[in-house]
Every structure is written in structure tokens, then in C-alpha cells.
Image (cartoon, rainbow, N blue to C red):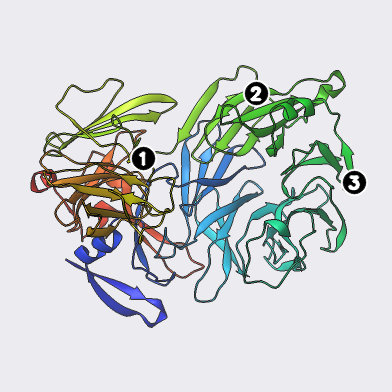
Amino acid sequence: MKKSYIMHNSYKKIILSVLALFLTLCNVGVAIAGAPPREGGKILLLNSPMHLQAISYATTSPNKKYLATVSYDKTAKLWNTGTGELIHTLRVPIDTNFPKSSDKLLAATFIGNNLVAVGGATKDVLKQRNWIYIFNVSSGALENTLGGISTKIDSLCSSPDGSRIAATQGYKGIKQWNTKDWQLISEDPHYEDELAYGCTYTDDNALLVTTISANNRLLKDLKPYKTNVRGEVKLYRPSGKLKRAASLSNVDDFWRIAIHPDNHHFVVSNSNKTHNGFSTGTIQPFDIPETFMPFIDKLKQQRIDAVNWSPDGDTLYFSILLNEKNTYATMMLDYKNLKNKPQPKIIANNRLPIVATLPIDNENLIVVTTDSFEKLNKKTEKTAYKRSTPKLRVNNTTLGFMTSTDGKSIFLGDVRRTGQKKHIFIDLHKRSVKLSDKTPVINLYPSARKIKGWKDTDKPYLNNKALASEKKSQLVYALVPFKKEINYIVGGKEKLVKFDKSGNVVWEKQTNQRVLSIAIPRDNKTILTAHADGTLKWHNAANGELLMTMFINKNTMEWIAWTPAGMYDASQNGHNLIGEHTNKKINEQPIYQTIDKLKEFHYSKKLFDKF
């Protein structure tokens, strides 16, 4: 079967076979290499109710009914805060080299309760500009776009009355638009020695902006900048003119702003665990009583993040990293009773960074991490619901990834699901994927352990021979010999390599996603790999060619498997896990279709028999 792809505005058709397409993909999510967003641009993507890459930001609507999350997977999602159910997946144009491209969504803000704006690194490669996409909350339809932004958008914010929206643009400063006619109100591009980062509006439509010091900029292509500039908090009048700026001698970077509900003062997440507050009208710093600093100092923290207030202003929420436990804690401080020197209280621990703490009312809040979010009650510390990434993350241990002799029975050990240790057993003979807390009793062949020393060296060796062509970042995991002769299969950042016992390359294949673990069945005909995007892949051991890819939603146990020739098999609702994203114009909403709607793919319950 063959498929047409329309290139740029010339509408030149390039005919690619499905086989060639999938061999280029190897991992769904990557399409025609190097092609920019274009009219008719198509890309195959994994799909899930929850994000498949890291959540970068989250915010709630003014009425607290909706939660918006944006992600490195370049989707935005709208959720019901009461139930945690997904309302809409909002899609924007994607570079067809995604996810290798730098495309990602980084910012979101609600404009009133009816619109939501998202942005980030959404560059139109042809014209070198980024876009802000504005969606209708009820329908999920794209209603408007704001373009002409030359750098990535770090933050978006809207005024309390919904009359204006602002975007921070790093060293390009800030811009503000009127939401009535979407005309530019003002801009301040004079940020040569610092990066505009966070923003928020006061009740009277004054704009507060935070900056990151030039010391932390990795912008080698720009002109020289001053290295003694510290981060600042800037206050702009409603007209857009800068009123004043403030900095602290002990703070290099300011991030997100949280204005107290009384609108008289605010706090800022920062790099140096400061306990200062700022007056909203004058942005003069003042000391918050040092009630919780001894506690923070005891934990040896270097930053306070994800700051926010309860609606009544009585509770201050923030996050810190607990060094001794290597976990991220969501904390609350009884701000109303500061005179009594209350101690901060930990209400939740997470293994991944906390993106936002979002109070829904005075008792409940949503804590968002890079791969999940949950609704908590601050008093009972009980979870009303939790939504987490569906991706498998296979442990690189002997018991983490095992296969039967023929490679058709696979055991994935310790796949964490809703905070509990669970195991997944895949039986290709029966077309089944099951979740269990017990290890199945079958004749399994364990994957081999890492060869010591390979992970932490810049000059990896194989049997005392240096693999000079290999980089540390590309050579991560290795397997001990298979078959009778001595051979090694090595998984790297984006490739799979077979070496002979002398360290010579037998074959090398690009994987486009980092290899987490490798297993080899006893029949030595296939190689199984587990990847960072949550996929499992079967390869021909003789030449490394991709035979089949499988994706399992660990939260629902739905699955889909497909071959480079366009054949696929899936569980009852598994066809929803992969689809085709079609770009239209850069300022138009893309089209998305699940795999069962595409003529080029053929469903077969006998897929595993052929494999």
C-alpha cells in the first residue's frame, strides 16, 4: 500500500510506501525526517487520555471547574476538576520530525472560564515564529491564534477580568494583547541581560513579570551580556509602561508568582529558598516571619517551587525536594496564624518534580507532577482521584524484563500502577495482556544485567577493547552473550548495536527512543527491547530489523501492536492508542484520526502468528 504526503505550499506529492514510512518511524511519533510543519503534513502518534511525555505546566480556570495541562508531547488537555475525567485533547500543528524536534507546549492560561490559551515552542520553521493557540473550553475548537513571536513562550497569563493576555518570551521580553480584538497592547523587548519567565496580573490589570539571571542562559549565539545581573520582579502599569523593578541580593532567579487573594502582596517561587514577600502595589520586598525557614534550612533546600494560595488566603502551598528521601514534597503553611509560628506540614510526597499546586477550594487542591496529577484533601491527606501516565517503564533488572524461549510470553516486573507494585504478563499466543501482583510460573528467560562500568564512563570498553566511536550518552545498557558465540547487544540513547566478542560492530539500528532494557529469548531468533516512550519492540537478531512494536496502557491494560508492513492487532479499545495527526495551516486546528479509520492499515487477529 502507498500513501501520499503533501509538501509545503507547492502541494508536491511524494509517494511513500507504508513499509518505508514505518521503517522511518520505528517509533510512532516520528515521521518524515527534517520536514517542517506544513499544509497536509502527516504524522503517526501514540495517543492516550493522559499525556505520554512530561507535563510542563498546569493551571485551573477562575471558577475552578477545569484543569488545563500542557506537555512535551505537544498536546494540551482539559480535565474536570471534580471527577478528574478528560474533557478534550487540544492539538496544535506538529513538526513532522517530532519528537526529535524541539516542539513542546510550555504554558497555558484560562481567559475567563470559556477560553484557554496554550503556547511554548510551537515554531513555524519556515517563518521562524511561535504561536499562541486559543481554544473554546466547551467545544475544544480552535478559535484564534496569536503569531509573530520569535522565541519560545515560557509563560502565559490573563487578567482577572479576561480583557487581556500576556506572554513572556525569554530575552525578547513580554507582549500583551487585548482579548476583545486580539490587538497588541504593548511590548517590552528590552531584556538583553535577563530572561522574562513568569507573569501574572493584579486585580487592576497591572502586570507582574519575573526574570531569570543571565548567568543561567545557554544562548551562545547572542551578543555578550552582563554576568552580574540578578533576577528581578517587574511591575508594569496597565498602559504597558514599566513602573518599577525589584531584586534580592540572595536570589538569582525568580519563577512563578502567586498573588495573595487580598491582592496586597505576593510570593514568588525562586532559586534560593527566600521567605520574602512583595507588596503588590510597590513590589517592595518584606520578610515573611521566619517561622518556616529553620524547617527549610534543616532540609538543606536550595529552591521553593509551585507556590500558591488557598482561595481564602489562609494557607500557603509550595513544593520542595527532600534530599534525604529523594522525593518531592507538597507542603502547606498555616499563613493565617504566622504569629503562632506554625510549622510547615507535608501533605504529599512524589517521586517526580512537582509542576503546580492548584487549590480548588479551601480544603482541596490538585497536585501536578511531570507524569501525573491527583486531587488531595489537605486535612485528611486522602486522594479523591489520581491520573498518571500510561507508559510502561521497564526496570533494567534481571526480574524486570523476561521472555519465554520463543519470545511470545513476556513478563514485565514491578510496573508501578497507582502507587503499587504490579506485574504485567503478555501472552501473544492468547492475545492477552494481564495485570498481576504475582510472578507467573512459566519457563522464562531473564534479561541480562548491565555490564558494570559502561554507564558511567566516557570511554566504554568491550573485553578490554575501547569502543572509541561510541559516546557515553549513546551507550547506556548492555547484555551478556547470546547464542554459542560471544556477542553483545547494546542499547543506547537512540540505537541498538550488536558487537562481536572483539568489539566490532555486527549491525547497528536507530531506535529514535532511548532503550531501557533488553531481553533475548533462548531461541536467539529475536531481540526484545523496552523503550522510554513506553513501547516494546521485537527485532530480528540476525540483522536488527524491526519486526513488531507494541504499546500497552498500563492503567487500562488496553494494547495495540503493529508491524512495519502496516498490519496491526489490538485489544477491544486498543485502536485508540495510535492515530494519524494531519497538519493544516500553521494557524489552523489539525485533524486526528485513529488507526482503524486509516485505509493503509489492516487489522488482523493473526498478527502474532505471522510474527
Quarter holding the N terminus?
bottom left
Q: Residues within 10 Å of mark 1 (few under 14, many from 20)?
A: few
Tell which circle, 1 or 2, labels the residue nearer the N-terminal end: 2
> Which residue lies under the disc numbered 2?
346
Quarter-of-image position of residue 600: bottom left
Decide which of 125, 162 is in the foreground and name it.
Answer: 125
| Point 72% across, 52% down: residue | 199
Q: Does residue 249 appear to the left or right of 413 in the view shown?
A: right
Quarter-of-image position of residue 435: top left
| Point 14% across, 27% down: residue | 443
Q: Residues within 10 Å of mark 3 (few under 14, many from 20)?
A: some
* Camera-nearest label, 3 or 1: 1
> Which residue lies under the disc numbered 1?
452
Quarter-of-image position of residue 294: top right
Residue 335 position, x and y percent, is 79, 26
- Amino acid residing under circle 3: Gln
Q: Mark 3 near mark 1, Cβ–Cβ under 8 Å?
A: no
Q: Secondary structure at mark 1?
A: loop
Give the spatial CA distance, label 3 vs label 1.
55 Å
- Amino acid residing under circle 2: Ile
Q: Residues within 10 Å of mark 2 (few under 14, many from 20)?
A: some
* Count of picture labels: 3
Tell which circle, 3 or 1, labels the residue nearer the N-terminal end: 3
Decide which of 105, 442 is in the foreground and name it.
Answer: 442
> Which residue lies under the disc numbered 3?
284
| Point 38% across, 40% down: residue | 391
Q: Secondary structure at mark 2?
A: strand
**Residue lying furthest front:** 464
Figure check: 268 above or below 211: above
